[in-house]
Image (cartoon, rainbow, N blue to C red):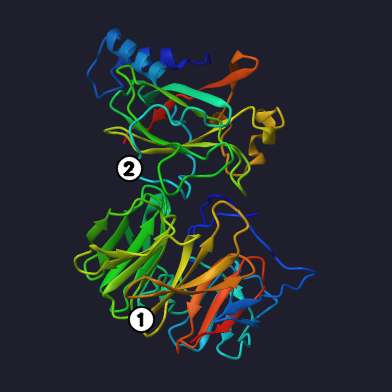
């Protein structure tokens, strides 16, 4: 018996009216359904909120101050929901340790509230976080909210982190809190060799409520 | 190794972070403390076991302590282990443990539930009674008020939640804080709720109005434990050094009314659990890396 593809099955169901009661419906509906299915995205894996979240972070896209020590880091991406729709109405809260691995728990250094642009894109300028004591991997915390979606709590990790020994595919669990390989992102070094800038793309997908 | 974050879904755990400091030399750690200028060596109860949490049972003569897997029942004040350890279970408390989520009448047992909720169970049967939505990530410091009227829970998203126990209706969400809460404790008269956490401060909240009455000056450590003396006059607080900067660990004593620091008591390592004895004459603690429950006399 030939195996039906998902597309074939949908057309077959449309033809027999079996997909939704007895009402027959044309190919355009099925095409729309297929397009929606193709556009659908998997939600970004969740990760721990951590103990140092602080509400009230200032709105800004630049977390570091001029002259801050550490490797300059630019994080960029876009925010979607699981239907594949961009979410310019989302808000991101980002927080991280400084280059020495210390969190500012008195103020809001390396903490920000970010609103994406009209295309759901965001852009952050900061420094590569250091290794927090007793925590294995460098990381940046995210709390992302959008109307109609579940809050996303996750963390971004870096493929260049020495703890992954150059092989994050196999070594990402070197930090037991890194539960998903997907959260370990490649790092592109750009700029002058004497003053490199690290760039990371981190796309976020919110699960619809 | 302790982690920055993790999920242990029961009231026996408390959010932990920081670095393990001194754990002793040659298998024996001298837990020298300095209080009012004099060094004292604490008495050790059940020194064979590495406990993570403990609390006094409502009878005042039994301590229930866990290593995360089993529960020991220890006689107070002799320190004799009463019986063989039993497996730790999330469904039922080993006794009425008010500091760790039992209601004063012993009817309810509240623990951190999935998705940042608070899970309330019938303490005698273990049956689920309520799932109370609270934090977006995780609840900590779940405690019933001594008068049985309120249930409070802090959490990582900076809010503190209070429910009316008679109806399980949410009474308030205290959103005046801007740090994660790791520990909550009620005054004996149920009129004050004390909160501590990543702020490194202790905040007193007035029951009923749920307004912040006052906050202490920032202490040196992120605070993960609060114990209120039985007379309600003193708080003992402890935690960990978030910067691992080799600051000496300590239990700090605060005036419960003013939240002014009265004195401190250095410990060899960070403290993982605190309790006053029922007569208020001893302070008990579990110290990271140290076996047993340490007991110091206090004034």
Residue B72, image quadrant = bottom right
| Residue topped by disc 2 | A56
What is the C-alpha distance between the residues marked 1 and 2? 33 Å
Residue found farthest to the top: A27
* Residue A181 in picture, x, y percent from top left: 59, 31
* Depth check, front residue: B271 or B199: B199
Residue found farthest to the left: B209
Q: Label 1 marks which chain's residue?
A: B
Residue A14, image quadrant = top left
* Residue A12 in picture, x, y percent from top left: 37, 14
- Under tag 2, what secondary structure? loop
* Depth check, front residue: B190 or A132: A132
Q: Label 2 marks which chain's residue?
A: A
**With respect to residue B53, does B104 lie above or below?**
below
- Under tag 1, what secondary structure? loop
Disc 2 packing (10 Å; few <14; some 14–19; many ≥20): few
Q: Is residue B120 left or right of residue A105?
A: left
Residue found farthest to the right: B26
| Residue topped by disc 1 | B232
* Residue A62 in picture, x, y percent from top left: 42, 27
**With respect to residue B99, does B82 lie above or below?**
below
């Amino acid at each position: 018996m030939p195996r039906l593809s998902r597309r074939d099955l949908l057309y077959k169901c449309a033809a027999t009216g079996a997909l939704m009661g007895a009402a027959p419906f044309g190919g355009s509906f099925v095409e729309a359904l297929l397009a929606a299915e193709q556009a659908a995205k998997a939600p970004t894996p969740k990760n721990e909120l951590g103990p140092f979240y602080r509400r009230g972070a200032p709105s800004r896209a630049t977390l570091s101050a001029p002259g801050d020590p550490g490797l300059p880091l630019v994080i960029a991406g876009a925010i979607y929901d699981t239907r594949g729709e961009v979410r310019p109405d989302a808000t991101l809260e980002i927080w991280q340790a400084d280059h020495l691995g210390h969190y500012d728990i008195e103020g809001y250094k390396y903490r920000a509230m970010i609103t994406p642009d009209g295309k759901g894109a965001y852009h952050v300028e900061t420094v590569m976080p250091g290794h927090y004591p007793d925590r294995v991997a460098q990381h940046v915390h995210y709390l992302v909210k959008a109307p109609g979606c579940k809050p996303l709590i996750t963390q971004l990790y870096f493929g260049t982190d020495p703890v992954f020994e150059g092989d994050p595919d196999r070594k990402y669990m070197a930090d037991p809190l890194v539960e998903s390989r997907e959260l370990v992102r490649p790092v592109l070094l750009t700029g002058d060799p004497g003053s490199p800038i690290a760039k990371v793309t981190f796309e976020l997908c919110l699960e619809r409520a | 190794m302790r982690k920055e974050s993790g999920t242990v879904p029961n009231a026996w755990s408390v959010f932990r972070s920081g670095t393990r400091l001194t754990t002793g030399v040659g298998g024996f750690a001298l837990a020298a403390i300095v209080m009012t200028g004099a060094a004292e060596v604490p008495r050790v109860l059940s020194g064979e076991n590495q406990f993570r949490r403990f609390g006094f049972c409502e009878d005042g003569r039994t301590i229930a302590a866990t290593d995360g897997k089993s529960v020991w029942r220890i006689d107070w004040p002799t320190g004799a282990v009463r019986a063989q350890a039993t497996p730790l279970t999330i469904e039922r408390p080993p006794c009425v443990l008010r500091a760790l989520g039992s209601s004063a009448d012993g009817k309810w047992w509240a623990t951190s539930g999935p998705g940042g909720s608070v899970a309330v169970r019938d303490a005698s049967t273990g049956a689920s009674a309520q799932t109370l939505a609270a934090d977006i990530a995780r609840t900590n410091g779940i405690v019933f008020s001594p008068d049985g009227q309120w249930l409070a829970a802090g959490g990582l998203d900076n809010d503190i939640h209070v429910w009316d126990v008679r109806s399980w209706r949410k009474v308030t969400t205290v959103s005046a804080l801007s740090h994660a809460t790791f520990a909550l404790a009620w005054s004996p008269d149920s009129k004050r709720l004390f909160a501590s956490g990543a702020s490194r401060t202790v905040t007193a909240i007035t029951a009923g109005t749920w307004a912040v009455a006052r906050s202490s000056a920032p202490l040196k450590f992120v605070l993960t434990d609060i114990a209120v003396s039985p007379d309600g006059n003193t708080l003992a607080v402890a935690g960990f050094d978030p910067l691992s900067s080799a600051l000496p660990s300590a239990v700090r004593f605060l005036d419960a009314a003013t939240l002014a620091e009265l004195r401190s008591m250095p410990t060899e390592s960070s403290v993982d659990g605190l309790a006053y004895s029922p007569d208020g004459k001893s302070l008990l603690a579990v110290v990271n890396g140290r076996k047993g429950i340490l007991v110091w006399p206090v004034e």
